[in-house]
Image (spheres, helix red, strand yellow):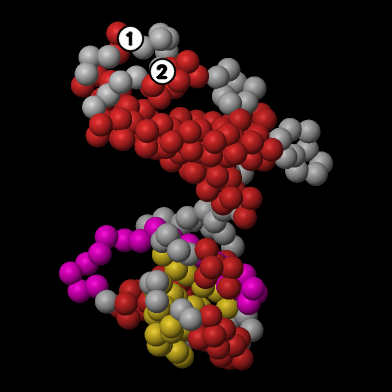
Amino acid sequence: MLYLAIDQHAKQITVCVRNEGGDTVLRRQVSTRPEKIQAFFQQLTEMDSQFMAILEVCGFNDWLIEYLRKWNCQEIVLIHPEKPGKRKTDRRDAQKLADLLWLNRERLAEGQTVHGLRRVYMVSQKEREDRQLTSLRKTLGQRRTRTLNKIHRIINRHNLIWNYPTKTFQTQAGRRWLEKVKLPQIDRLEMNMLLEEWKTWDEQIVQVDEQIVERARQVEPGKTLSATQILMTAPGVSHYSGLTLASRIGPIERFPAREVSRTILG
């Protein structure tokens, strides 16, 4: 068994590999070009086909984790990064991760908790996609809100809010009024652009909402309800909020019973 520690960056990874006896058998930097990564894992598995790996979580772990799975990594240990030190280097980081993995290899292989090590739950492909989809929905909602706030500012700048045809702002009658209301030239130019933005955000939100509803209805074989559908039995939980919660909680079995409520409710 080999123990692979990886310090990951966008264009390169720094690796430190130890054998069962704790000796460092390989320490180098590898370009993240696909052919270089392929060659590295080929070299690694020629040394020993069985290996464990440890790396710190970052915004672009996905492809590397998939490579580790592809090469039949026995256990992938994903952890939260520590606070950077004054003498931080890639080689030192990889060496430190290698120490951590090798010293705790038996406990980590058995899935046991290691004191001081904040292990990260690795989401499934479906959970990752659900998180991406619900985050996109949140972003679109925020963009629409910013656009509406800009429209409000133009209307209020000219004290025209009293002429608005409806009590609520987001109505078809209100949009038609905004298209025709008299404004100074530059304000009219900006208003036309903002109305186009508003229309775009609404159309994109509809597309995303359709995907959210479809994914929220998906039920695993052998189950009556999905996690999202169970959450939606609570008052006020929609497809969007239910899918958001379900994709971030993951399997409830991974939480100690006393921690479940605090984890969910914050």
Q: Earlier in the sequence, mark 2 or mark 1?
A: 1
| Camera sees residue 92 | yes
* Highlighted range, magenta: 68-88
Query: Residue at 58% of width from left, 17% of height from top?
Result: 235
Q: Which residue is mark 2?
A: 177
Q: CA distance from mark 2 to mark 1?
A: 9 Å
| Camera sees residue 248 | no
Q: Mark 1 is on which residue type?
A: Asn
The reply, left or right, for residue 227 in relation to residue 108 is: right
- Is the residue marked by circle 1 packed among few (<14), some (14-19), or many (20+) residues within 10 Å? few
Q: Which part of the image, by quadrant, shows the N terminus?
A: bottom right
Q: Secondary structure at mark 2?
A: helix
- Is the residue marked by circle 2 packed among few (<14), some (14-19), or many (20+) residues within 10 Å? some
Q: Is residue 154 above or below residue 223?
A: above
**Is residue 123 part of the magenta span, yes or no?**
no
Q: Is residue 48 above or below residue 188?
A: below
In the image, farthest residue toward the right: 222
The reply, left or right, for residue 225 in relation to residue 112 is: right
Q: Which residue is mark 1?
A: 163
Query: Residue at 33% of width from left, 31% of height from top?
Result: 191
Q: Main secondary structure of the magenta part?
A: loop
Q: Quadrant of residue 167?
A: top left
